[in-house]
Image (cartoon, rainbow, N blue to C red):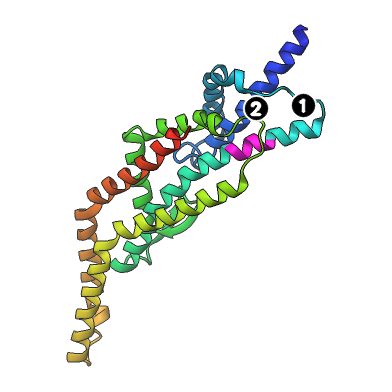
Amino acid sequence: MLGQLLTAEVFGFLLVFARLGAGAMVLPGIGENYVLARARLGIALALTVVVYPLVHDQLPAAPASAPGMVAMIASEVLHGVFVGGIARLMMSAMHTAGAVIAFQSGLAYAQTLDPNQGTQSALVSTLMTLVGLLVVFTSGLHYELIGALRDSYLLFPAGAAPPVAGFAELATTIVAGAFKVGIQIAAPFFVFGIAFYTGIGLLQRLIPQVQIFFVAMPLQVTLGLVLIALTLAGAATWFLEYFAGIAVELRAVR
């Protein structure tokens, strides 16, 4: 009896670790490439130790066959990846805003590796992504994301088949919302770009002998940097409100 009880506890702990570990590996800030794998593993284990007693009564019994056990663990991993992936999709709002700002301010040629996206992108995109990550952690919203992983057991019972169609629909909605917020954050730069290029075009028609575009490039970059400095605080606040609304909704679902 003691052996059976120990086996059930180990399997239950493994199920919780599969969901929370998968979610922690995808969450913004915690699951980044520049965070040591051992640190991420330690965070996942610590979360499992805390959450396991809270969801112990909701865990199913261990299946009798090995394929059934693998399928159940894979289902838990998918649930964790979904919750963490939603948070990462929300972070793409700042990346989108940074890409638009870079093109409108003439800074698109300044490329660097974005540690949050894992790809090479414009320097302004990396800046905006890091600012978004900073305000999320300084405001304590990362606790809401961790709480969403715990509350996911209320919406997606352990051992149940993942609702793939619902996952896809929600992911599509989040991507559309993040793109919308990114464009709204970069809206002042659309106005700046239209006004600047219209003025450059008129000057080029008036003085066709001079390459006005190349002469005005330093001015465009300078004005773009000034506009970034003036709007960065507002952009961070706008993104924080958007992120907080989605994060609270992830926990409010019952």
Residue 213: name its quadrant.
Answer: bottom left
Element carrying mark 2: helix
Cα gap from disc 1 to disc 2, whole angstroms:
12 Å
Q: Which label sits on residue 52?
A: none
In the picture provided, is 231 more to the left or to the right than 143? left
Q: Is residue 176 visible?
A: yes
Q: Which residue is mark 1?
A: 63
Q: Amino acid at mark 1?
A: Pro
- Is 77 inside the magenta-drawn segment? yes
Tell me the crowding category of disc 2: few under 14, some 14 to 19, or many 20 or more residues within 10 angstroms, Cα based: many
Dominant secondary structure of the magenta stretch?
helix
Tell me the crowding category of disc 1: few under 14, some 14 to 19, or many 20 or more residues within 10 angstroms, Cα based: some
Residue that extends furthest to the front in the rendered view of this protein: 254
- Is 118 inside the magenta-drawn segment? no
Q: Amino acid at mark 2?
A: Leu
Residue in the image at 46% along x and 43% along y: 87
Q: Which residues are magenta?
A: 74-79
Residue that extends furthest to the top in the rendered view of this protein: 2
* Residue 167 percent coordinates (x, y): 56, 46
Element carrying mark 1: loop
Rendered position, 122 above or below 49 = below
In the picture provided, is 9 more to the left or to the right than 136? right
- Nearer the observer: mark 1 or 2; the answer is 1
Q: Which residue is mark 2?
A: 15
Mark closest to the chain's N terminus, 1 or 2? 2
Residue in the image at 47% along x and 33% along y: 148
